[in-house]
Amino acid sequence: MKDITISGKTLRREMLIVLGCFIVAVGVNVYSIIKYRTPFSEIFTQIGYTLILTLALLIVVTLIRLIVCLIKRIFIKK
């Protein structure tokens, strides 16, 4: 069985995508805290919801990347 190796460049890119999704989720959380005038301690107490939103955003980004990749393969032939 072959080993799968992931290059450092690919790993760095994927980590930045996950970090970006997390930052967006935290931003949404901070926005909702300010809009509904709730205590800022909810940034820490609602971390579970923030992580779920991060995962949802990551799934959406992955689906978009998959669709773009499929479109490229269909229309760009070697």
Image (cartoon, rainbow, N blue to C red):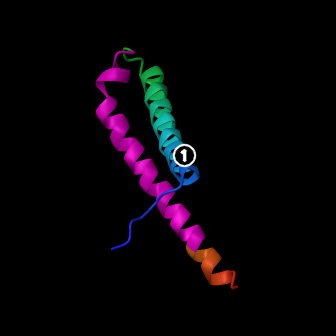
Which residue is under mark 1? 12
Q: Which residues are magenta?
A: 40-69
Q: Quadrant of the N terminus?
A: bottom left
**Does 40 sit above or below residue 56?**
above
Residue at 39% across, 66% down? 3
Q: Is residue 50 magenta?
A: yes
Mark 1 Cα-neighbour bin, 10 Å: few <14, some 14–19, many ≥20? few
Where residue 55 sits: x, y (%)?
A: 38, 47
Count the marks: 1
Task: Judge by depth and name the residue closer to the eye, 7 or 29.
Answer: 7
Looking at the image, residue 7 sits to the left or right of residue 32; the answer is: right
Secondary structure at badge 1 equals helix
Residue at 45% across, 51% down? 58
Q: Is residue 10 magenta?
A: no
Determine the image quadrant of residue 69: bottom right
**Does 52 sit above or below residue 59?**
above
**Does 65 sit above or below residue 32?**
below
Q: What is the chief secondary structure element of the magenta stretch?
A: helix
